[in-house]
Amino acid sequence: MVKIESISSHILRVPLEQDKVFYSSQAKFTERNSYLVRIETDTGLIGWGEGGQYGPAEPVAAIVDHVFAQKLLGRDPTQPVVIWEELYAFSRDFGQKGTYIEAISAIDIALWDISGQVAGLPVCKMLGGAFRGKVKAYATGCYYPEKFDDMSGVLEKLRKDVSGYRESGFDMLKVKIGLLDVHADAERLRVIREHVGPDVDIMVDANHAYSASTAIQMGRLMAPYNIRFFEEPVVPEDKEGYRRVRADNPVPVAGGETEFTRFGFHDFISGGCVDIVQPDLGVCGGFTAFTQILAIATVHGVLVVPHVWGSGIAVAAALQAIAIIPPTPHTANPIPLQNEPVVEFDRTHNSLRDDLLNEKFTLEDCYVRVPQTRGLGVTVNMDVLKRYEVKW
Ligand SMILES: [Mg+2]
């Protein structure tokens, strides 16, 4: 039997140069950071996982190193579901959402990576098989610049950003909204639609900046610009607000990047909150939770489009997960965004996404290939890891 021999946490941090700093409706981004876990077996196999995409990485590292590691050393890594249930049951009384689940997510991704390597299969085949070998990618960008109160500068930068995504090969964009008043943000969307023409899909993400009534107003203002989905209109706790926005605004509603486990997603999905649900592999509970969330979503006819905001390991995990999502509904000729999942490609500057792996994810005619080797199908460049790793 293969055994877990060592577990190590790695906190990576890349400060952004002044001209690469950007804003969402909630935060100024002056750096990118990732939490990675490395699990090694007594046979020399190495699995990688990533957890906790939004907050500081140190609490996730502390839970993995000081709470969970001692429970895992010497265990068989090829039973991630068993280990998931044990870790969750242990931390249920104090960790049903948040940092504990992010730690479980990282461990779960690494264990599935190892299990795939032991079996000689990619994670998607370990989970039942791939509906697709490549996934259509959308560019996440169009953030706000430092001087976001200068509207002519904002619009000029938007046109430049959008032209860059188009030249890189994307025909799907996600635009940040919610930092300015609804009329100014609607004007940003009008300008983008005018700039790209009718054939590019545009989605928006408010990062829960609005009350339900403001979100409904925004949805009505932007509907003429043919918006495919409206992400995180209201705060994640406000399920009644989600239902109101979904009922009274014409744009399909998406959300779920800050929801956790099958329990949280059951309430969110069966509560009628969204048309498109967006679990993040490093937050929701890894592949084990993802398969359960997928089952709940398919029962309710909700399309699953995983959220991705992290290093190359997070992108690799998302691609394996997206491969196993059945078309919703299952049709003879599935249409991207209508009944096919897509993958989020954050376009802000992040060396942890672009340089950390020995393998690169490239866009080929708007699509990214799902690695078909073993486990996650990627390896970490240790020189790059050491360059960005910080002590804690
Ligand atoms: Mg988002």
Image (tube, grey):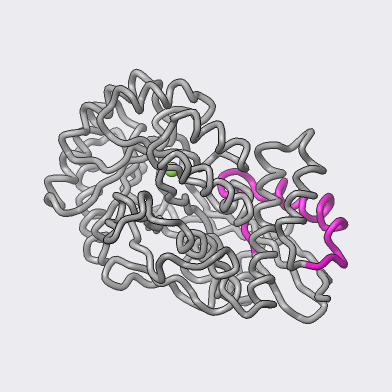
Q: Name the image quarter holding the N terminus.
A: bottom right
Task: Please identify the residue farthest to the top as the structure is shown.
Answer: 213
Compared to 178, does 112 lie above or below? below
Mark yes or no: residue 364 visible. yes
Q: Quadrant of ligand 1?
A: top left
In the visual, does 37 lie left or right of 14? right
Q: Residue at x 61, y 42 (%)?
A: 262
In this picture, residue 35 sits left or right of residue 267: right
Res 213 quadrant in image: top left
Please, is residue 213 above or below residue 314 in the view? above
Where residue 47 appears, x then y in whole percent? 68, 70
Quadrant containing the C terminus is bottom right
In the image, what residue occupies the spot 37% across and 56% down? 342
Q: Residue at x 20, y 53 (%)?
A: 200
Please state the horizontal and vertical placement of residue 255, each as a whole percent of the image.
Answer: 44, 38
- In depth, the one of 83 and 13 nearer the eye is 83
Q: Could one spot residue 352 in this view of the protein?
A: no
Number of marks present in the image shown = 0
Residue range in magenta is: 49-76
> Magenta stretch containing residue 52, yes or no?
yes
Q: Give residue 206's quadrant in the image.
A: top left
- At 49% from the left and 25% from the top, the residue drawn is 239
Pinpoint residue 383: horizontal percent, then vertical percent.
Answer: 62, 77
